Amino acid sequence: MRVLVVPFPWKTHLYNLVPLAWSLRTAGHEVRVAGWPDLLDAVAGAGLTGLGVGPGETPTVRRQRDRRQTSDRAAAARRAPRQGLEPLFDLRPDRARLSWEQACGVFDDLVLPQARRSNDPMMEDLVAVARAWRPDLVLWGAKAFAGAVAAAAVGAAHARVLYSVDVYTRLREDFLHAKARQPPHRRADAMRDWLAGWAARYGVEFCEDLVNGQFTIAPFPEAFRPDARPTTLPVQFVPYNGPAVVPGWLAGPPRVPRVLMTFGDVADDGPVRLPLPLERVREILGSVAGLEMELVLALPPDARRALGEVPGNTRLVESVPLSEVLPTCSAVVHHGGTWSFGCALRHGVPQLLIGRAFDAPLKSGCLDRAGAGMAMTPAQADGPAVRAALVRLLGDAALRANARRLGEEVLAMPAPNDLAHTLREVVAAHRGGAALAPR
């Protein structure tokens, strides 16, 4: 079977796809990764075969271009609080839905502009690659919609691979629910118009599969899949962080409870945007200085230099492989990023989310529902609040037991190797008996 992997054009999104890509390769399938040229070094570094599609830009150049192209309206939408979007993050089965105006605003001001900037430049190249190679299956990272269009253009099965809790399916369903209740002249659907325009170039009619995939591969346990769908295939979250060296201080067990505090890394070769000002970080370190613990604080070099001297129970590092440090930790404080969140789940570590990401409220709600963590906004995260949260994370036996239970649930999910075998059967069913490329 031939499998074309299409990541959203950021290294962290590529890393999310590496374990499954390697599982397919070791199962005997042909695998190629098609991505923006600036991803190809990372693809090769992971031992995979890469194909360049789209512009040859570096992440820094792309960020500068994106800032120039971002409208004032979209920039304001990113900065605006999530007022009115509470239904999107509500876990109750009878939750209210977003209104038409709310759903349109999120799609038109946030989702679609980013999708166009990231997908339009690689669409034609990607379809040409698919037509030349004829994959049986296209695995596209969430938001890499060009993968769905390319798959449809060549009749390949295709799946969306999530990197987080599936907030985008909820958003689309709320949009369609509200759209059906509008008079015909008000049923504008910019997402559909964009994808339908591309699909028509290649003789394909629009269908919702272009938005959410023929099926979805989801990396988190059931509690973190609030809208279960029969077309969802669960898979274990297996971290891949790129090349890493285990530091010497991790060689033995910690003498006191270890806590990791991390606010992201530099996997995408750009500056880390800390959710808290350094003055607040200093305040937090002062507040927790008296706790019997080893606080491992990961910060980029410029922030470490600016932070200055730290308390005796704090170890200041630039970066650390999460899959190595988290098994030694009793708690973790992070910004809600995919790798911190997923690794903590896998290793059964209680979490404190100080979130800024769009999906942070949904992650926080799932953690709270499972009784395995806590959350606060950056504005709430002062010294006393973080100290109180850490005291609870380290001392609440029920919370710690729930975190361990979630870790057991993750490990009980199908591993990528198991899913690799399942995918051949799923692809054969979706292709209606069409012959697959030899293994």
Image: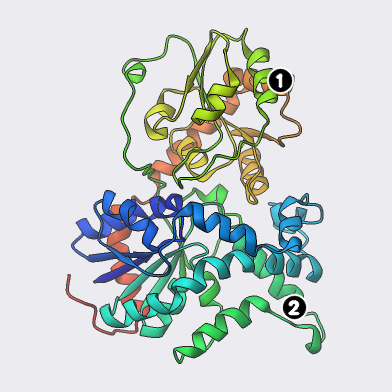
Q: Is residue 423 above or below residue 289?
A: below
Position of residue 15 measured from the top left corner of the image (x, y, whole percent): 39, 50
Query: Can you tell which mark lies on residue 383?
Result: 1
- The label on residue 164 is none
Instruction: Out of 268 and 98, give the one closest to the viewer.
Output: 268
Q: Is residue 227 visible?
A: no
Q: Looking at numbered disc 1 in the image, what kind of residue is underneath it? A: Gly
| Marks 1 and 2, the one that precedes in the sequence | 2
Colour convention: rainbow
Q: Residue furthest bottom?
A: 203
**Residue closer to the observer: 45 or 425:** 45
Is there any visible trace of residue 427 in the rendered image? yes
Residue 380 in which image quadrant: top right
**Which dot, 1 or 2, sits closer to the camera?**
1
Quarter holding the C terminus is bottom left
x%, y% of residue 83?
81, 52
Residue drawn where x is 74% and y is 67% of the image: 103
424 with respect to 287 (left or right):
left
> Separation of disc 1 and disc 2 at Cα?
45 Å
The residue at the point 52 percent across, 40 percent down is: 341
Question: Image quadrant for the N terminus?
Answer: bottom left
Q: Secondary structure at mark 1?
A: helix
**Which residue is denoted by mark 2 in the rendering?**
179
Where residue 340 appears, x then y in whole percent? Answer: 50, 38
Q: Residues within 10 Å of mark 2 (few under 14, many from 20)?
A: many
Residue 266 x %, y %: 47, 40
- The secondary element bearing badge 2 is classed as helix
**Residue type, numbered disc 2:** Lys
Determine whether 427 is above or below 235 in the image.
below
Residue at the (28%, 80%) spot, across then down: 134
Front residue of this view, candidates 11 and 87: 11
Residue placed at 35% from the left, 81% from the top?
128
